[in-house]
Amino acid sequence: MSNYTKDFKTCKEQIELMKIRGIKFNVVSEIEAERVISNINYYKFSGYMKVFEISLDKYDIEFKKFIELYEFDRKFSRILFELIEKIEISFKTNLGYYISERTKSLGPFGYLNTLEWKNYSVLNKKTNSYQVKKSHEILRDRLDFQKKITEYTARNTNGYIESYFNKYKNEHFIPLWILIEVIDFGMATKMYTESVKDIQTKVSKQLNIPLINDLEFYLKSLKLIRNIVAHNGILWNFKLISRLNKPLITQYTDVNDKSTVAVLVVIVEILKKVDPGYDYSELKNLIINYFTKNLDLLDKFGIKNKNLEIINQIL
């Protein structure tokens, strides 16, 4: 087994290493480049450099090209985060609404009785029929759900949670319409996937996705992209593990169905219902302006055959 033996290098030493590897500083000076990598971790920045590599650690390119790609990715990430946030808010709002609607006869805490809104039927492979989970399994799930929402509530720092418990001292839980503001996208997605078909159908309809299984699949992809952006990851050439091989994506034959562009197609389709008046001009101009000058990177972005025109169809 080999060991990692690379030594620490100063910013100036990193610049010298880049020069040895064929990176030029005719447009951006070495001094300015030092300032850049002193504020952006070299390891992170190297993630943008690698796509221009002509062979292992060999380049023939201006340092400015890395900065341009980095700036494109940061702006692209910011816009996608904003769009996914719109979807997340709408999704959580609708999920809370339809669970509350279904449990309204039980009062503001009716959602705690998960029997009312969760799907506890499982497929018996021996009989090839569905049957309800055993009572002790359901009880365990109900208690686990209560534990999770208590944890979300306890670690929330919003003042309205503290105000709620100061006002209602005898309560140990918050109503679902408040809880929806406390849980994260992942928890909300889990609640959706475990809910009964009636709730899933109503929520998916509100998000402009007719098939409930498709929405579940798309939500997981949106959550993944959101997490990448939230942790300052590289987004522009990110590849999903699973293909988004649904009709919504496959209608665009020049879109790689594992790419961020495929997720963008999903975002736009959902926003047709959530925010039909949204102006995509900034995003469209950003993508077209960058890749017009960098057509060779278009395939890594997720668009095949250098068909940049497809952005006008998507957006």
Image (cartoon, rainbow, N blue to C red):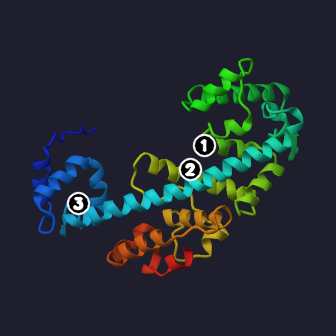
The type of residue carrying mark 2 is: Lys
Q: Position of residue 1 (x, y in %)?
A: 28, 38
Marks 1 and 2, how far apart in space? 7 Å
Q: Are marks 1 and 2 in contact (CB under 8 Å)?
A: yes
Question: SS of the residue at dot 2?
Answer: helix
Which residue lies at the image location 58% right of the left edge and 76% below the top edge?
252
Residue 237 shows in this picture: no
Q: Earlier in the sequence, mark 3 or mark 2?
A: 3
Residue position for label 1: 186
Q: Are marks 3 and 2 in contact (CB under 8 Å)?
A: no
The type of residue carrying mark 1 is: Gly
State the residue in front, 293 or 274.
Answer: 274
Marks 3 and 2, how far apart in space? 34 Å
Residue position for label 3: 56
User: Left or right: where does residue 6 sit relative to residue 239?
Assistant: left
Q: Earlier in the sequence, mark 1 or mark 2?
A: 1
The type of residue carrying mark 3 is: Leu
Camera-side mark, 1 or 3 = 1
